[in-house]
Image: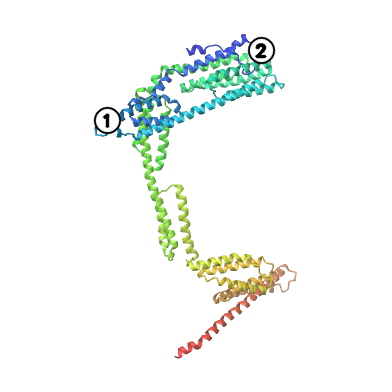
C-alpha cells in the first residue's frame, strides 16, 4: 500500500494548472493542492512506522505481573517510575498497582485469619509490612511526578500558544506597511522560522491556530503581488533545503537499522511537507522523483525486514549468546590486580554495550537471555566490588603504617637524646619504602610530611642543632624581638656618641639572658648584622661608619679572650700576607732601576705597592685596639687573681 502511494506524482505539478505563471508565490505560500498530496505521502510513511514488528517489540517488553510476588512488584514499580521514559510506562504501572493491591489484600486477609485462629481478637489485628510502606511512598512520588509533568507540559504548550499568537499578530502587521519590500520579506522569513521552532500547543487550539496562521500567510503572499525577485530567492532557498533532505534520505537508505531509518524518514517527509515551499518548475519533478526513490528504498527494506523478522531475531539470539559466553569467561577467570581489573572492566563494558545494541531476540528466549546477561553482570560487579573492598582495607592498613612512621619521627625530634636515633631513622626510611601501595591522593601528602620531618632530623645533625630548654627558648624569643627592633633605631652621627649608644644597646641585649652553644654565636652575629645595616643607612660620614662598625665588632668580643686572640691572629696573618706581596713587588722594582718613570709596568707596580701599604696600615690600625683590649683583659684577670691570693695563701699555710 505504501509503495503505491509513494509513486504519486509531485503535488507541485498541480500548481501548473491551478496557478497561472503570473501568480508565482514566494516561500511558504500555502497552495492547498500541493500540501494535500504531500501530506498523503507523508502519512503513508507515518503508517509504516507503526507496523507489526514495532507492535511485537512493545509486546516483547511486556511482563506477566500476575506471577510476581509483592516485593518483586514493588521493585519493578520503583524501576519503572524512576526510568528516564517513565511516562511511556503508564499501563504497566497501572497493571503493577492493580496486581499489588490484589495480592496484598489476599495476604492481609490470610494474616488476619491466622491471627484469629491463634486466639487473637480481630479488633487488635494490625499488619503493615515494610514493602507496603515502600509501595505507598513510590506511588505517591510517581503521582506527584506525573502531576508535575503534565502541569509543566500544559504550561509549556500555553507559552507556545501565546508565542504563535504573537507571530500571527506579526504577520498581520506586515500588511500595507510603507517599507522596502525586501525588508518586509526578511521579517516574514524570521516569523516563519520562529513559527517552525515553536513547540506544540494545546490540542484543542492546535488546528484552529494553524488555520489562522495559514490564512494570514496567504494574505501576505497576496500582498507581495507576486514579486519575481523574491520568488526566485525563495525557490533557491527551498531547492537547497530539499537537496539536503534528499541527501539525508539517501543516507538513511544505507543505514543498517531499518526501523530507525523508517522513523527518521517520517521526520524528513514532515519537513518536506510543512516547512518548505515550492521550487522552480524545472526542478520539481526531478527533486520529487529522487526523494521518492530514496523513500521507496527504505520502504522496501522495511518490507524485507518484516519478511525476515524471525530470521533476524534468531540471528540476534546467536550473537547475544556469544557475548554471554565471553562474559562467562571473565566471570570464571577474575583478575588478580588493579591493572588487570581496569583492562577487564573496559572489555566487559564493551561487551555490555554491544549486547544492548543488538536488537530483539525470539520471544521464547528473550527473558532467559536477559536474565543470564543480568546475572553475569551482577556477579562480575560483585567480584570487582569485593576485590576493591579488600584493596581498600589493605590500603587503609598501609596508610596507618605510614602515619605511624611519621609520628615516630616526630616523637624522635621531640626527645632530648634525638641524636642517638640516627640508626633508627635510617631503618624508618627503609620501612617506609617496604610499605605497599596507597592511593595517590594520600600518598603525596603523607610523603611530603614524612620527607620534611626526616630532612629536619638530618639538617639538625649537619648544623649542630642543640635542643634548648623552655627558659632558653623564652630568651631566644626576646632576643629575636630585640633584633627586629634595631631597624627602627635612630643612631647618633657622632662617633663618640655612637659608641655610648652602642654600648648601651649591647648591655640591654645581654641583659635579656644567656644562650648556649652555637645558638649564642648566631644571635650575636644577627645583632651585629642588624646594627651594621642601620649604620650603612645612617647619615654618618663614610670614615665614621667604618670606625663605628669596628667599634661594634671589637666591643662585642672585648670580654672574650678566645675571640680576641683569634681576631688578632687573623689580622696578623693578613698583614703578613700583605708584607710578603710587598717584598715580592719591591724585588721586582729592581728590574726597573734604569727605566723611565713613565714605563707602564713600573707605574702599575708602584700603584699596587701603594695600595698594599694602605691596606697594611688599615689592618695595623685595627690591630692596635685589639691588643689594648687583650692587654686590659689579661690585666683584669691578673688583678682578680692577685685579689684572691691572700685567702688562698692563708688556706695553704694553714
Comes first in the chain, label 1 or label 2: 2
| Quarter of the image that includes the C terminus | bottom left
Give neighbour class at mark 2: few <14, some 14-19, many 20+ (Cα, 10 Å): some
What is the secondary structure assignment of the residue under circle 2?
helix
Badge number at residue 469 = none
Q: Looking at the image, which residue is at 48% across and 89% down? A: 649
In whole angstroms, how far apart are the C-alphas of marks 1 and 2? 86 Å
- Marks 1/2 in contact by CB < 8 Å: the verdict is no
What is the secondary structure assignment of the residue under circle 1?
helix
Scheme of colours in the image: rainbow
Q: Residue furthest top?
A: 17
Give the residue at mark 1: 113
Left or right of 461: which side holds 170? right
300 and 169: which one is in front? 169
In front: label 1 or label 2: 1
Residue 577 visible, this angle: no
Tell me: residue 304, above or below residue 651: above
Percent position of residue 10, x then y:
57, 13
Percent position of residue 77, x then y:
39, 30
Left or right of 118: which side holds 340? right
Quarter-of-image position of residue 55: top left
Give the residue at mark 2: 23
Amino acid at each position: 500500500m505504501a509503495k503505491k502511494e509513494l509513486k504519486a506524482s509531485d503535488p507541485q505539478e498541480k500548481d501548473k494548472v491551478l496557478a497561472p505563471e503570473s501568480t508565482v508565490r514566494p516561500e511558504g505560500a500555502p497552495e492547498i493542492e500541493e500540501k494535500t498530496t504531500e501530506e498523503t505521502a507523508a502519512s503513508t510513511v507515518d503508517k509504516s512506522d507503526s507496523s507489526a514488528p514495532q507492535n511485537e517489540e512493545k509486546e516483547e517488553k511486556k511482563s506477566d505481573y500476575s506471577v510476581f510476588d509483592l516485593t518483586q512488584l514493588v521493585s519493578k514499580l520503583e524501576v519503572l517510575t524512576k526510568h528516564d521514559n517513565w511516562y511511556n510506562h503508564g499501563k504497566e504501572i497501572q497493571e503493577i498497582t492493580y496486581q499489588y493491591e490484589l495480592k496484598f489484600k489476599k495476604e492481609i486477609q490470610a494474616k488476619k485469619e491466622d491471627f484469629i485462629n491463634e486466639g487473637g481478637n480481630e479488633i487488635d489485628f494490625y499488619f503493615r509490612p515494610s514493602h507496603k510502606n515502600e509501595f505507598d511512598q513510590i506511588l505517591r512520588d510517581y503521582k506527584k511526578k506525573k502531576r508535575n509533568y503534565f502541569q509543566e507540559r500544559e504550561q509549556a504548550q500555553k507559552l507556545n500558544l501565546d508565542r504563535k499568537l504573537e507571530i500571527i499578530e506579526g504577520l498581520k502587521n506586515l500588511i500595507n506597511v510603507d517599507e522596502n519590500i525586501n525588508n518586509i520579506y526578511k521579517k516574514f522569513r524570521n516569523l516563519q522560522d520562529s513559527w517552525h521552532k515553536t513547540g506544540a500547543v494545546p490540542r484543542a487550539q492546535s488546528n484552529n491556530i494553524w488555520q489562522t496562521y495559514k490564512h494570514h500567510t496567504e494574505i501576505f503572499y497576496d500582498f507581495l503581488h507576486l514579486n519575481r525577485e523574491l520568488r526566485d530567492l525563495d525557490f533557491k532557498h527551498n531547492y537547497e533545503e530539499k537537496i539536503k533532505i534528499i541527501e539525508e534520505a539517501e543516507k538513511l537508505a544505507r543505514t543498517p537499522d531499518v526501523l530507525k531509518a523508517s522513523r527518521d524518514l517520517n521526520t524528513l517527509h514532515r519537513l518536506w511537507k510543512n516547512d518548505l515551499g515550492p521550487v522552480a518548475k524545472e526542478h520539481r519533478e526531478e527533486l520529487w522523483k529522487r526523494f521518492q526513490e530514496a523513500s521507496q528504498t527504505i520502504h522496501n527494506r522495511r518490507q524485507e525486514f518484516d519478511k525476515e523478522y524471525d530470521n533476524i531475531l534468531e540471528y540476534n539470539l546467536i550473537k547475544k549468546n556469544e557475548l554471554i559466553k565471553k562474559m562467562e569467561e571473565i566471570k570464571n577467570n577474575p583478575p588478580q590486580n588493579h591493572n588487570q581489573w581496569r583492562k577487564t572492566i573496559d572489555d566487559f563494558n564493551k561487551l555490555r554495550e554491544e549486547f544492548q545494541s543488538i536488537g530483539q531476540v525470539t520471544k521464547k528466549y528473550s527473558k532467559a537471555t536477559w536474565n543470564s546477561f543480568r546475572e553475569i553482570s551482577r556477579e562480575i560487579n560483585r567480584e570487582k566490588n569485593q576485590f576493591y573492598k579488600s584493596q581498600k582495607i589493605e590500603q587503609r592498613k598501609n596508610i596507618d603504617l605510614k602515619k605511624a612512621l611519621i609520628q615516630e619521627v616526630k616523637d624522635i625530634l621531640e626527645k632530648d637524646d634525638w641524636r642517638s636515633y640516627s640508626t633508627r631513622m635510617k631503618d624508618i626510611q627503609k620501612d617506609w619504602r617496604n610499605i605497599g601501595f596507597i592511593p595517590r591522593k594520600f600518598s603525596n601528602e603523607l610523603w611530603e610530611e614524612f620527607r620534611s620531618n626526616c630532612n629536619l632530623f638530618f639538617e639538625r645533625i649537619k648544623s649542630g642543632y642543640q635542643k634548648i630548654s623552655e627558659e632558653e627558648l623564652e630568651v631566644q624569643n626576646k632576643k629575636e624581638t630585640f633584633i627586629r627592633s634595631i631597624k627602627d633605631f635612630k643612631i647618633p652621627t657622632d662617633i663618640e656618641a655612637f659608641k655610648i649608644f652602642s654600648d648601651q644597646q649591647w648591655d640591654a641585649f645581654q641583659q635579656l639572658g644567656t644562650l648556649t652553644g652555637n645558638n649564642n654565636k648566631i644571635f650575636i652575629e644577627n645583632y651585629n648584622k642588624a646594627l651594621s645595616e642601620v649604620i650603612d643607612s645612617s647619615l654618618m660620614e663614610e670614615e665614621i661608619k667604618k670606625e663605628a662598625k669596628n667599634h661594634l665588632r671589637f666591643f662585642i668580643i672585648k670580654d672574650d679572650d678566645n675571640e680576641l686572640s683569634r681576631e688578632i691572629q687573623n689580622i696578623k696573618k693578613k698583614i703578613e700576607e700583605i708584607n710578603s706581596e710587598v717584598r715580592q713587588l719591591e724585588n721586582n722594582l729592581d728590574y726597573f732601576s734604569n727605566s723611565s718613570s713613565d714605563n707602564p709596568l713600573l707605574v702599575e707596580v708602584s700603584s699596587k705597592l701603594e695600595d698594599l701599604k694602605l691596606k697594611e696600615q688599615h689592618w695595623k690600625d685595627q690591630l692596635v685596639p685589639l691588643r689594648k683590649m687583650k692587654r686590659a683583659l689579661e690585666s683584669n684577670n691578673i688583678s682578680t687573681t692577685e685579689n684572691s691570693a691572700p685567702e688562698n695563701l692563708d688556706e695553704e699555710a694553714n
